[in-house]
């Protein structure tokens, strides 16, 4: 508990109402709080008062649980309430023991995540004038879904489908459709109750569950399908009006163009209603619902009324058992006459189940409204479809002429069909397929059967117009949310909202344009199958979203709706895809192709969004499962991979080192960029939190597949020891330490050189391989970074006083410790580095311009094609094969595959051919493809005198000059300078020293034009080779070479094998 000082206790104990008083527990009356006091929202307190900061009754700035701490937005004009940060609770009090107000985020210009007010049920019963309109589950979901399901297919095509497929198969079609939609309804209910749902409907639910890749593609397709749905329902309305006009002999132009004209005018009126706002649209939907219910009642009454002569001539004979029996079986006719042909036409009539979810942002409580309203709508519409199919199939024959004098005496031998028994002869038109009426020929059969035909016409108008209106709203709302997420280019223009409900006016206009384009087709049976596959694709992904979220076992998957099963959801996804191909296989391929194209585009663009999708949870599960599984796998040479811990410091300070290692580890093995921050833990911790994400983003932007790991330590060596011991997970642990060559070792403080060589010894002690990289221009481009610092971030930053971020060449300013720069300047400096700071003026006053150019070139040397140069490998000592393996992996990459690899080995002049053949034979067994082998017979020759003298001059400042005294005397002399080289050590290591000088001569003669030189790293024995002498070896070995030099030493264990087991 972070306790407040005693002086900050409230004066009035009665205000400590965070817990019960003794009198309350014993039954006494607790004094009422002051009138101005609100226990839930203490808005009467000022933000500046310390008392405001205290959690009542607990004497602490820690806060009790509250909804506001988890919400993403607040009331307009109100400061956002937040909990204290860990730093506020855990760190020291500042400014004289007082803390600033924490309970509210009152930053000016603070942008909330959601521009709308978060409406909580029951929190505010009075509606503010500027508050958006919100709907409950009946008006907002159930009625809307029922209206969208009861579309044009119900009135104009269900009787025809019943005649084609028969009552039995029609029920199967209905139930199969309902099975898909019911399972999808359960899945959408689970997804919508797994957290607060905002606007965007289906797109929002899928994208936040499966991620932007699938969510974006299906959102675009679903919005398009709804826009085409507007055209389908409008064409159904236009067909009815056209038939009325023809019935009264007043056509406009011709049957096809009449549909087009009426359709365009109708959809324009619907657009006007939508633009009027959701409140008017909702009122229109309620009116349409009442009209449809009246039309249903009118139809059912009509089936019970004895048929008139006119209705009988059109095939209606009221309920007859023989008509019911005859209509049980199918009678396929026409091009669409098949089970799946009928299914493709009927299925869009069941797709309205998402109408409520599509306006999720306009619901009072989406988590309650969507499940309850959607499932109730599916139930009642299913009952209505089954009832209408059974009743109309029991009353109307398939063929009728409509001719009033086509009567016949019952039992006449010249008459065929059921109608003959009722006194009507439809035989001639049935044989010639010229009947205008009957269940299979007349689309307006429900109107004919009803008690009062105009009410059915009104019902058709209500069903078609309400469905078209719902599709128009859904298309615009879904597309608006997609546009706001900016997953695709050129669509952001349509995301702008207007008014208190943020109406997508531009989205309405786009959906209107698409609808008009499809209205021009003017054929309902052509438009319906087009959208079936798009809706099925949406349903498949919704069900898969629910299944995938369930199997990932993510703690974040906690839907309050429990009546779903992951296996049911999977079945729904599979059956949706199967039905897509059974309906129209080529249309299914097109739909899936479009989804894949949009999916691959988003994957390529990699939008910077983080929605906590199940795909992310699944990735974690896979990584965890495989990582744990690796623990059961024994190490084998054939499975060896170079897993590198790269001491980069800040990765952007040593880009060449990062690029080099990233090249051969890409898609192959582990790479971790290690960074040691030197200094007191308390001072460096804020910096640690600040820079980690920035460095990871820099690696991603540079397309380096690596991890970033940082530690705080008192010195460089101890920090690297921590990294080598703690980095990695299970078998995914580094086995190679990659470090840059310490270029300034001769001028740096000797203690830093001692630490540097100590790191190499530590690596070998931890059984690591070691790779040291040297470039003539140097690896550290921090001067370039500092020269680009934007003054806006740090106007007073002095690079000389910057902290020593520990990488491979970091140096301590003194033996006593690291001088720390002020936290503010350090923080701003780091921000400037991470952001880039290229906009500001270049501060080159303290930096050599030529050095900047060289460093900039060095930073990109491994990002370009290397051309037809050579990679020279000096395999001087057998380290297990690592010296060969890394160049081999490098040569497989595109930027290096034109380089010829040469292998140099030591040998004797009188055995050159034999030794060359032996090495070629060994390399061929390794299957590395190295055939260019050179034997160096003069490797043990004495180097030239001037080069030897140069080496002696190099080590002269580091000599102890003890005159070959005994070991005890030498130890005493260099107690404070362990890096000093005794005369005895120089004498014992003379042969090795001269070998490095001679090797440098060979390198200068043979490899000056190489793209890369790889040399076996010499090893200096601990306690026998001082750090300064070892550094002189490395310096001499790679001195004056133009190409980058890589010094490699494996851990003396095989990493190559020529066996198959």
Image: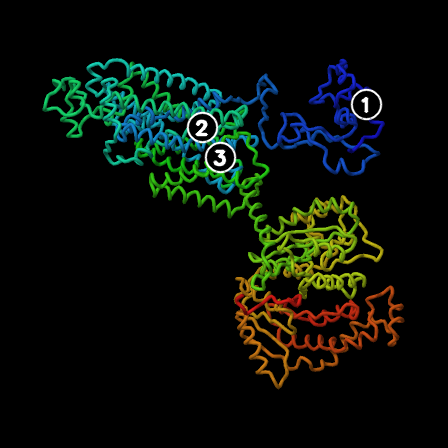
Badge number at residue 204: none
Q: Is residue 410 above or below residue 586?
A: above
Query: Between marks 1 and 2, how big is the CA–CA gap?
Result: 54 Å
Measured along the vertical axis of the image, is residue 166 above or below residue 674? above
Q: Dividing the picture into quarters, in which one does residue 197 lie?
A: top right
Locate residue 942, reporting x and y percent. 71, 82
Q: Marks 2/3: CA distance?
A: 23 Å
Q: Nearer the viewer, residue 220 or 738?
A: 738
Q: Which residue is mark 2?
A: 355
Residues at discs 1 and 3 in contact (Cβ within 8 Å) = no
Q: Which residue is mark 3?
A: 565
Residue at x-position 59% and y-position 26%:
118
Earlier-in-chain disc, 2 versus 3: 2
Q: Is residue 304 left or right of residue 1037?
A: left
Residue 177, relative to residue 674: is it above or below? above
- Res 486 visible: no
Q: Is residue 814 left or right of residue 349?
A: right
Q: Nearer the viewer, residue 442 or 859?
A: 442
Name the residue carrying label 1.
10
What percent of the width, then of the height, locates residue 89?
76, 35
Number of residues whose C-alpha sits closer than 10 Å to that of mark 1, classed few (under 14), some (14–19) or many (20 or more): some
């Amino acid at each position: 508990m972070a306790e407040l000082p005693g002086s900050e206790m409230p004066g009035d104990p009665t205000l400590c109402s965070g817990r019960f008083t003794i009198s309350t527990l014993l039954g006494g009356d607790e004094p009422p709080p002051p009138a101005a006091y609100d226990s839930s929202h203490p808005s009467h307190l000022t933000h500046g008062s310390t008392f405001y900061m205290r959690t009542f009754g607990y004497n602490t700035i820690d806060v009790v649980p509250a909804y506001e701490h988890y919400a993403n937005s607040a009331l307009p004009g109100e400061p956002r309430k937040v909990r204290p940060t860990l730093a506020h609770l855990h760190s020291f009090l500042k400014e004289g023991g007082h803390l600033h107000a924490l309970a509210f985020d009152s930053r000016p210009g603070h942008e909330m995540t959601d521009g709308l007010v978060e409406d909580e049920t029951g929190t505010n019963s009075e509606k503010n004038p500027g508050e958006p309109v919100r709907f409950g589950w009946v008006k907002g979901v159930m009625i809307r879904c029922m209206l969208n399901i009861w579309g044009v297919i119900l009135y104009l095509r269900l009787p025809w489908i019943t005649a084609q497929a028969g009552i039995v198969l029609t029920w199967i079609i209905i139930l199969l459709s309902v099975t898909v939609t019911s399972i999808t309804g359960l899945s959408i209910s689970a997804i919508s109750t797994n957290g607060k749902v905002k606007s965007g409907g289906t797109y929002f639910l899928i994208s936040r569950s499966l991620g932007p890749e699938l969510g974006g593609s299906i959102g675009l397709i679903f919005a398009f399908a709804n826009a085409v749905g507007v055209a389908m329902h409008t064409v159904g309305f236009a067909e009815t009006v056209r038939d009325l006009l023809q019935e009264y002999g007043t056509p406009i132009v011709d049957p096809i163009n009449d549909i087009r004209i009426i359709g365009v005018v109708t959809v324009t009126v619907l657009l006007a209603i939508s633009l009027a706002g959701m409140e008017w649209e909702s009122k229109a939907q309620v009116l349409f619902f009442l009209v449809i219910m009246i039309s249903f009642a009118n139809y059912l009454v009509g089936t019970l009324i004895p048929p008139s002569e006119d209705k009988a001539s059109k095939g209606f004979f009221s309920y007859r058992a023989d008509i019911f029996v005859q209509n049980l079986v199918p009678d396929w006719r026409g091009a669409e006459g098949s089970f799946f042909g009928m299914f493709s036409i009927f299925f869009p009539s069941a797709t309205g189940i998402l109408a409520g979810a599509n306006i999720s942002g306009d619901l009072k409580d989406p988590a309650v409204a969507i499940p309850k309203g959607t499932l109730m709508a599916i139930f009642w519409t299913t009952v209505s479809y089954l009832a209408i199919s059974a009743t109309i199939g029991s009353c109307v024959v398939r063929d009728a002429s409509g001719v009033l004098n086509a009567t016949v005496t019952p039992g006449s031998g010249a008459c065929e069909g059921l109608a003959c028994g009722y006194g009507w002869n439809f035989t001639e038109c049935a044989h010639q397929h010229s009947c205008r009426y009957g269940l299979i020929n007349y689309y307006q059969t429900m109107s004919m059967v009803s008690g009062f035909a105009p009410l059915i016409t009104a019902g058709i108008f209500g069903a078609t117009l309400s469905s078209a209106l719902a599709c128009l709203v859904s298309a615009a709302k879904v597309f608006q949310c997609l546009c706001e997420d900016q997953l695709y280019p050129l669509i952001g223009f349509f995301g702008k909202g207007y008014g208190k409900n943020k109406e997508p006016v531009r989205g309405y206009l786009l959906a209107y344009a698409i609808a008009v384009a499809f209205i021009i087709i003017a054929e309902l049976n052509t438009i319906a199958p087009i959208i079936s596959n798009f809706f099925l694709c949406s349903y498949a992904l919704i069900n898969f979203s629910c299944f995938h979220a369930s199997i990932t076992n993510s703690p974040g998957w906690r839907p309050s709706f429990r009546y779903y099963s992951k296996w049911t959801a999977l079945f729904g996804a599979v059956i949706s895809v199967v039905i897509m191909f059974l309906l129209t296989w080529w249309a299914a391929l097109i739909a899936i192709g479009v989804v894949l194209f949009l999916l691959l585009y988003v994957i390529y663009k990699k939008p910077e969004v983080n929605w906590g999708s199940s795909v992310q949870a699944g990735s974690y599960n896979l990584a965890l499962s495989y990582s744990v599984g690796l623990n059961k796998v024994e190490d084998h040479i054939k499975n060896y991979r170079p897993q590198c811990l790269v001491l980069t410091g800040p990765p952007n300070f040593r880009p060449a080192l990062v690029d080099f290692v990233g090249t051969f580890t890409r898609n192959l093995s582990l790479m971790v960029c290690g960074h040691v921050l030197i200094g007191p833990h308390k001072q460096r911790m804020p910096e640690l939190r600040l820079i980690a994400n920035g460095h990871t983003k820099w690696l991603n932007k540079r397309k380096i597949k690596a991890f970033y790991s940082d530690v705080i330590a008192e010195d460089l060596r101890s920090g690297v020891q921590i990294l080598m011991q703690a980095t990695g997970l299970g078998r995914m642990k580094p086995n190679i330490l990659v470090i840059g060559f310490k270029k300034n070792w001769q001028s740096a403080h000797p203690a830093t050189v001692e630490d540097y060589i100590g790191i190499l010894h530590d690596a070998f002690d931890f059984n690591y391989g070691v790779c040291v990289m040297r470039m003539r221009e140097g690896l550290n481009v921090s001067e370039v970074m500092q020269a680009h610092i934007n003054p806006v971030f740090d106007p007073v930053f002095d690079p000389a006083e910057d902290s020593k971020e520990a990488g491979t060449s970091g140096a301590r300013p003194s033996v006593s410790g690291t001088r720390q720069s002020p936290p503010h300047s350090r923080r701003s400096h780091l921000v400037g580095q991470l952001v880039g700071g290229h906009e500001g003026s270049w501060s080159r006053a303290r930096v050599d311009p030529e050095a900047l150019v060289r460093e900039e070139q060095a930073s990109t040397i491994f990002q370009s094609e290397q051309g037809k140069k050579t990679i020279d490998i000096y395999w001087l000592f057998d380290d297990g094969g690592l010296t060969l393996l890394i160049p081999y992996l490098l040569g497989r990459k595109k930027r290096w595959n034109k380089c010829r690899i040469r292998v140099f080995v030591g040998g004797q002049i009188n055995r050159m051919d034999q030794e060359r053949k032996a090495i070629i034979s060994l390399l061929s067994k390794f299957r590395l493809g190295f055939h260019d082998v050179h034997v160096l017979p003069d490797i043990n020759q004495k180097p030239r005198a001037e080069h030897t003298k140069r080496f002696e001059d190099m080590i002269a400042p580091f000599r102890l000059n003890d005159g070959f005294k005994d070991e005890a005397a030498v130890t005493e002399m260099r107690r404070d300078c362990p890096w000093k080289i005794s005369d005895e050590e120089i004498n014992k290591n003379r042969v090795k020293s001269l070998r490095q000088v001679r090797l440098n001569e060979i390198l200068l003669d043979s490899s000056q034009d190489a793209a890369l030189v790889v040399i076996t790293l010499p090893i200096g024995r601990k306690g026998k080779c001082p750090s300064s002498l070892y550094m002189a070896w490395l310096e001499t070995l790679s001195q004056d070479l133009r190409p980058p030099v890589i010094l490699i030493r494996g851990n003396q264990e095989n990493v190559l094998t020529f066996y198959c087991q």
